[in-house]
Image (spheres, rainbow, N blue to C red):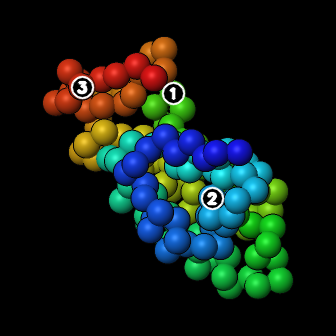
Amino acid sequence: MKRHVLNASYDRAFYEKRPLLYVDFLRDTFVSPMGQSGVECGAGWRPILERLSDELEALISALPKRRQTMFCSQAKQKLGSLRFYMSNAYTDDMQAAISRAEDECDMTCEVCGSSAKDHHCVDRVRVLPGSTEAETKRR
């Protein structure tokens, strides 16, 4: 099966820096949507996802006995919000980090990364602040 990476904003180095979290992207078995497509979010959220990924990688590496069961199975934008899914097992600290990142993405333009105060997500339209509204694209 060939990998279909949807977003070049998240290059191979993004995944290789966090080999425990993104193990499914880095292997050739494509078990989950992460393994098939990689991160499905715009470049504006990359700094948020980098911080989240670094925090989750550190939390996973602190739990060596459970590390094989903890990885990102999907990261995507849906209806203007970040959806970040872990495999079956994750800790409360991991869930708290994911929730903080999801909240931050709700106030950040997915395209340019600027602060977005008003989110009007209708019919799967990307969330953009008013200054870049003309750039809105349907998925």
- Looking at the image, residue 56 lies above or below residue 72: below
Mark toward the start of the polypeptide (3 vs 2) = 2
- The residue under the point 24% across, 25% down is 135
Quadrant in the picture for the C terminus: top left
- Looking at the image, residue 78 lies above or below residue 75: above
Q: Residues within 10 Å of mark 2 (few under 14, many from 20)?
A: many
Q: Is residue 132 left or right of residue 71?
A: left
- Amino acid carrying label 2: it is Phe
List the residue tagged with mark 3: 135
| Quarter of the figure with residue 131 | top left
What is the secondary structure assignment of the residue under circle 1?
A: loop
Mark toward the start of the polypeptide (1 vs 2) = 2
- The residue under the point 70% across, 59% down is 28
The answer to whether residue 11 shows anywhere in this view is yes
What is the secondary structure assignment of the residue under circle 2?
A: helix
List the residue tagged with mark 2: 25
The spot of residue 4 in percent (x, y) is: 57, 42
Quadrant in the picture for the N terminus: top right
Q: Which mark is residue 79?
A: 1
